[in-house]
Image (tube, grey):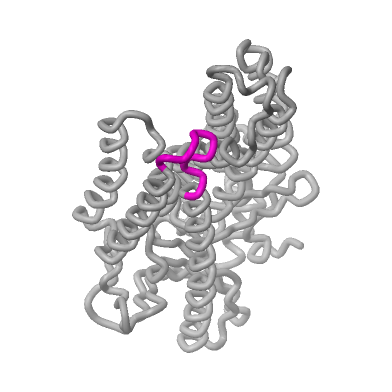
C-alpha cells in the first residue's frame, strides 16, 4: 500500500487503542496527561505503520531495478524483521521523548498500550502490503516464498474513508474539522471525474463517509476518553468487510479466468493467475495468466480484464486508466488484451547463464522476455516497460549483483526447480 494509506490506518488504530484502554486513575488523571498519552499512541501507531518501508534505503545495494525489486518489501517486511522494528521504535521513543518516558514509567496501561500500538502498526503494514499483487514473504528465514493477496488495489480509498472520517471528526476546531472532512470527500470525487473511479464506487464511498460521520456526531458529547471510539470501530469493521468482499470477488474472478483458459486451449496447464483489483470496486479486475504447454515446451502469458458481475457492470465499463481499455466488442464479462509465448528452454538458459536475469527471476511472477530486456507483465503488456524492466543483455558482461536475497523464485515451476 502507499504510505498515505499506511499513515491514515495507523493513526486510526492508534486512536482506537487510546480510546479503548482506560487511563489509570493516579498517573494519567493529572491535567494534560491523557492528551499526552493520545499523542504518544497516535505517533507510535503512525510511525510503526510506515517503519517497514525503511528498506527503501537498502535499494541502493543493487543496480536498478534489482535493488528495488529485491530489497523493497524485503527483510523489513517479515515477522522476524518486524520484531526488531518494534523494539527499535519503542527504544527510540523511550530515549528521545522525555515526557513520553515519564508517562511510560508512571503508567502500566500506557506501557501496554504503547507496545500494542507498535505491534499492531508493524503487523498491519506487512498484512496490508500482502493484500495486493506485489506480494511479501513474511515468514523468512523459515519460508522464503512470496505470498500474494491479489485482493486490494495498492492505493485504496476505502481505507482513507474508513479511518480518515472518524479521525477528522475528532479534530478540535470546527473549521479544521470541516476542511479535513471536505478533503476526504473531494479527493475521491476528483479521481472519479478523472475516470479512475466509477460513479458507483464514489456513491459507496460517500455512503460510508456519511455513516461514519453520523456515528461520530452521535458520540461528539461523550467524554474525550471515549469520543470517536464507535466511529473508529465502525471504520475498522468496514475495512475488514471490504477485504472480505474482495476475497469473495477474487475467488469468482479466478474461477472465471480458469474456465476461459480451459475453453481457449484445453492442452495448456494454468499455473497462476495474478489478479489486480480496481480501487473501491469489487466487480472489476485485471489479470495476467501464466500457463505451460508440455507438447511444444512453451509457456504462455495472457493479459485481460474481467467483471465478476457483467449483468451489473460490463467489463468495458471498468475504468480504462487503471489497466487499459477493454474495447467495445467481445464478451460482457471478460476481455483479452494481449498474449505472448516463449520457450521454456530460452527462459531456463537465461536464468542459468545470466546472473542478473537470475536475480531478477527471484522477483518476476509473469516474466515477459524481449530481445534484450525482460519485464514482469503484472504491470504492463508485453513490449511495454515498467518499474520492473531489466536490460539483461546490457548487464550481462557486468559483475554479478551482490547481495541478492534468497527469495524463492516465484516461477520455480517454469524453471524446473523444486
> Which residue is located at x 47 percent, y 52 percent?
235
Inspect this view and state whether residue 366 appears. yes
Residue under the image location 69 percent in, 42 percent down: 78
Q: Main secondary structure of the magenta part?
A: loop
- 369 above or below 73? below
Query: Residue at position x 55%, y 68% from top?
Result: 343
- Where is residue 13? Give x, y as percent: 55, 41
Q: Looking at the image, which is closer to me, 185 or 83?
A: 185
Extreme-right residue of the structure: 142
Q: Nearer the viewer, residue 383 or 38?
A: 38
Q: Residue 196, percent across and down?
A: 28, 56
Does residue 360 show up magenta in the picture? Answer: no
In this view of the protein, can residue 156 be seen by the observer?
no
Rendered position, 235 above or below 345: above
Q: Tell which of 5 and 402 is nearer to you.
A: 5
- With 367 as the anchor, is 418 left or right in this view? right
Q: How many marks?
A: 0
Residue drawn at x 53%, y 37% is 15
Place of residue 29 in the rendered image (x, y in percent of width and height, measured from the top left): 61, 22
Q: Is residue 178 left or right of residue 146?
A: left
Horizontal side of 33 relative to 334 (left or right) equals right
In this rendering, the answer to whether 342 lies above or below 255 is above
Residue 122 lies in quadrant = top right
- The quadrant the C terminus occupies is bottom right
Give the quarter of the image for residue 279.
bottom left
Range of the magenta residues? 220-230
Please check the rendered image and state whether residue 227 is part of the magenta-colored stretch, yes or no.
yes
Give the percent coordinates (x, y) of residue 162.
43, 51
Amino acid at each position: 500500500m502507499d504510505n498515505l494509506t499506511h499513515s491514515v490506518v495507523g493513526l486510526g488504530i492508534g486512536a482506537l487503542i487510546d480510546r479503548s484502554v482506560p487511563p489509570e486513575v493516579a498517573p494519567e488523571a493529572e491535567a494534560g496527561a491523557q492528551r499526552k498519552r493520545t499523542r504518544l499512541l497516535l505517533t507510535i501507531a503512525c510511525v510503526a505503520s510506515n517503519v517497514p518501508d525503511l528498506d527503501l534505503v537498502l535499494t541502493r545495494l543493487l543496480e536498478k531495478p534489482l535493488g528495488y525489486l529485491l530489497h523493497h518489501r524485503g527483510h523489513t517486511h517479515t515477522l522476524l524483521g518486524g520484531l526488531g522494528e518494534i523494539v527499535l521504535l519503542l527504544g527510540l521513543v523511550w530515549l528521545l521523548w522525555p515526557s513520553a518516558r515519564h508517562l511510560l514509567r508512571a503508567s502500566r496501561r500506557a506501557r501496554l498500550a504503547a507496545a500494542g500500538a507498535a505491534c499492531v502498526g508493524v503487523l498491519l503494514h506487512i498484512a496490508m502490503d500482502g493484500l495486493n499483487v506485489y506480494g511479501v514473504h513474511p515468514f523468512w528465514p523459515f519460508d522464503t516464498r512470496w505470498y500474494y493477496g491479489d485482493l486490494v488495489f495498492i492505493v485504496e480509498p476505502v481505507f482513507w474513508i474508513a479511518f480518515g472520517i472518524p479521525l477528522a471528526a475528532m479534530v478540535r476546531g470546527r473549521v479544521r474539522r470541516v476542511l479535513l472532512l471536505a478533503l476526504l470527500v473531494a479527493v475521491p470525487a476528483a479521481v472519479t471525474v478523472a475516470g479512475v473511479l466509477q460513479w458507483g464506487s464514489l456513491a459507496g464511498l460517500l455512503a460510508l463517509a456519511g455513516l461514519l460521520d453520523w456515528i461520530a456526531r452521535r458520540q461528539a458529547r461523550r467524554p474525550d476518553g471515549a469520543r470517536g471510539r464507535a466511529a473508529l470501530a465502525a471504520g475498522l469493521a468496514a475495512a475488514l468487510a471490504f477485504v472480505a468482499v474482495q476475497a469473495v470477488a477474487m475467488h469468482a474472478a479466478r474461477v472465471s479466468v480458469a474456465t476461459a483458459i480451459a475453453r481457449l486451449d484445453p492442452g495448456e496447464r494454468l499455473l497462476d493467475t495474478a489478479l489486480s483489483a480496481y480501487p473501491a470496486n469489487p466487480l472489476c479486475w485485471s489479470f495476467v495468466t501464466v500457463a505451460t504447454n508440455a507438447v511444444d515446451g512453451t509457456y504462455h502469458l495472457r493479459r485481460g480484464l474481467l467483471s465478476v458481475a457483467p449483468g451489473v457492470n460490463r467489463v468495458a465499463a471498468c475504468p480504462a486508466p487503471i489497466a487499459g481499455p477493454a474495447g467495445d466488442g467481445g464478451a460482457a464479462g471478460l476481455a483479452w488484451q494481449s498474449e505472448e509465448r516463449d520457450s521454456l528452454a530460452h527462459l531456463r538458459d537465461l536464468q542459468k547463464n545470466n546472473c542478473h536475469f537470475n536475480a531478477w527471476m527471484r522477483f518476476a511472477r509473469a516474466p515477459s522476455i524481449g530481445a534484450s530486456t525482460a519485464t514482469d507483465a503484472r504491470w504492463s503488456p508485453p513490449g511495454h516497460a515498467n518499474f520492473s524492466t531489466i536490460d539483461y543483455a546490457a548487464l550481462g558482461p557486468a559483475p554479478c549483483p551482490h547481495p541478492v536475497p534468497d527469495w524463492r523464485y516465484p516461477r520455480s515451476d517454469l524453471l524446473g526447480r523444486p
